Image (cartoon, rainbow, N blue to C red):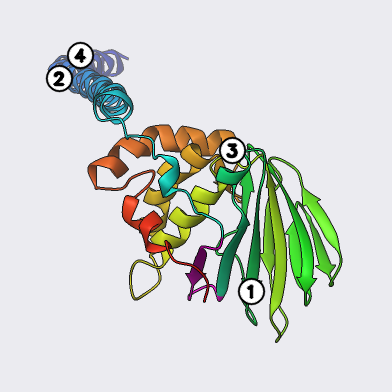
Amino acid sequence: MLNSEKQIILTNIQYQKEAEYDQPNFILSSLHIDSRGKMKKRTTILTLSILLAYILIGNFLHRFAFAEAEPDLSFYPAKGEMIENRFANEKIVFVTPGRDTNGKYSENDLYLQAKGAVPKPHRHADLEETFTILKGNLSLIKGDKKYDLKEGDSITVPKGEAHHPENKSDALVIVRVRATPAGKHDLMLAQVHGFFTEKETPRGKVEWILQAMLYSVYYETYMAELPIGFQKFLSFLISPVARLLGYKSWYPEYSLKWKRSEE
């Protein structure tokens, strides 16, 4: 019995010594964990502060300090002027440009060669478009529906609805496109196709995304894949970087490129 009690006492003494030995290690470990937590918090605060400063300063520089000048009407397409996009097998001839209707509407004839298509599915937040088939057969995605339109057919795409005209046939398609109101629609066509055809090869995805951040809000024309509100938010975040890299909402050279009449 005495030996058993003695063994218990010795065991308790050993546990106490081990506990006393481990206590400093426990304290150091706790301090290390606390230090890592504070460091992580400081890093988060610093990151958010830098991001906020970038958003505020970047947008101030983009929108106010170095705001882009508005183009005058001479940079808008005139009657008879023509746009060609070899990558899309597409040609546009301005029939009644918005500059001639005081912005009430604009009309152009869209020529799509075999397998040609408007470059990207998109939506216009500020205007409606009416497509009237003058020749051939046009495939049109409108919202979540697909339409096969023949000569004489007409269809209107309301504001904000995604759409994508395409020629899936082996013959030429000619479509009269009416935008109501005209807004900056004619200028947008000159600028977008000027951007896509500036180089000898098609534009890369990153180039297009950076340019689209400026085009989308300025022309109220958005990619079909994402909600308009989200694209406006992305534009707010990315536009200062795009401007810093040399991208613009409009380029004089793109408008001047098309200043010729159809032969």
**Comparing labels 3 and 4, the label whose residue is closer to the camera:** 3
**Comparing labels 1 and 3, the label whose residue is closer to the camera:** 1
Earlier residue among tags 1 and 3: 1
Q: Kindly identify the amino acid type of the residue bearing the numbered disc 3.
A: Ile
Q: Which residue has dot 1 on it?
A: 112
Earlier residue among tags 1 and 4: 4
Earlier residue among tags 2 and 3: 2
User: Counting other residues with Cα less than 10 Å from the Cα at mark 2, is it few (<14), some (14-19), or many (20 or more)?
Assistant: few
Give how far across and how far down residue 24 sits, in percent.
13, 16
Front in this rendered view, residue 230 or 140: 140
* Residue 213 visible in the shown view: no
Q: Which residue has dot 4 on it?
A: 16
Q: Please give left or right for residue 261 compared with residue 16 in the image.
A: right
- How far apart are labels 2 and 1 at the CA level? 74 Å
Q: Please give left or right for residue 172 compared with residue 214 in the image.
A: right
Front in this rendered view, residue 258 or 86: 258
- Residue range of the region highlighted in magenta in the rendering: 80-89
The reply to whether dot 2 and dot 1 touch (C-beta < 8 Å) is no
Earlier residue among tags 2 and 1: 2
Tell me the number on the disc at residue 228.
3
Q: Secondary structure at mark 2?
A: helix
User: Counting other residues with Cα less than 10 Å from the Cα at mark 4, is it few (<14), some (14-19), or many (20 or more)?
Assistant: few
Q: Residue at x 74, y 60 (%)?
A: 141
Earlier residue among tags 2 and 4: 4
The reply to whether dot 3 and dot 4 touch (C-beta < 8 Å) is no
Q: Which residue has dot 2 on it?
A: 28
